[in-house]
Image: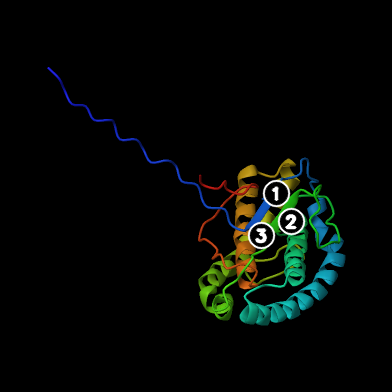
Amino acid sequence: MSTNTRPSAMPPPAMTPSPHPARLTATPDAPLSRWLWLVKWLLALPHYVVLLFLWVAFAGVSVVAFFAILFTGRYPRALFDFNTGVLRWNWRVAYYAYGALGTDRYPPFTLADVPEYPTHWELTYPAELSRGLVLVKWWILAVPHYLVLGFFLGGARTAWFTGGLIGLLALFAGIALAFTGRYPRGLFDLVIGLNRWVLRVAAYAALLTDVYPPFRLDQGGREPEASS
């Protein structure tokens, strides 16, 4: 007696997130000093001074880029590299100081990527950008993300605490270092995931990409792999 058998239903392949053009990777240094984090606000002061001027230049470059995209659909490469470099520099200082406390290696004074530094931020140069989106993405379309980032970043700032969820978690990391000499890995992964979200939104709002930031917390020091 013959029986008809149906092949068992195969589970759908696991989907992994599509890669975002803004890519943040980080490796925590080990060991980390138990007490250096208490004075990093002072050690990082030269960077804060330089970044003040860089952010002023960033704003001016963004205005020029706005009109370039509006009329040509392209972000001039030299301007793109400069603004991407400012975001990279700012992130390295945050990673050293109170945005992550992920390294005791002093941040380099450069806009370029430094291969031997334990964190990297890269952004794919777009061959073409939407002329219409440039009018609305940095304010109307990005508003939902601004609300989220307000929670992540907060507004209160002191020497040791930058406010918001990221600053609070970095403070917890510093306390853990002081008492145990270790940076809890789960805490590190969460902090990097939050900063990854922030940098994706920053790239979008700065007109550097048309790819809308996902409402997704990709934790850990590595970017999620592309789906096949």
CA gap, disc 2 to disc 1?
A: 9 Å
Q: Secondary structure at mark 2?
A: helix
Q: In this orientation, which residue lies closer to the viewer: 112 or 127?
A: 127
Which amino acid type is shown beneath numbered disc 1?
Answer: Ala
Q: Are marks 2 and 1 in contact (CB under 8 Å)?
A: yes
Tell me what residue is drawn at x 15 percent, y 20 percent: 2
Which percent across, then down, holds residue 174?
72, 52
Q: Is residue 164 visible?
A: no
Q: Secondary structure at mark 3?
A: loop
Which percent across, then down, holds residue 94?
74, 60
Mark 2 sits on what residue? 95
Which of discs 1 and 3 lies nearer the camera? The answer is 3
Mark 1 sits on what residue? 26
Taking the view exactly as shown, the residue that stands out farthest to the top is 1
Which percent across, then down, holds residue 46?
87, 66
Which amino acid type is shown beneath numbered disc 2?
Answer: Tyr
Q: In this orientation, which residue lies closer to the viewer: 225 or 220?
A: 225
Mark 3 sits on what residue? 124
Badge count: 3
Which amino acid type is shown beneath numbered disc 3?
Answer: Thr
Tell me what residue is drawn at x 76 percent, y 58 percent: 92
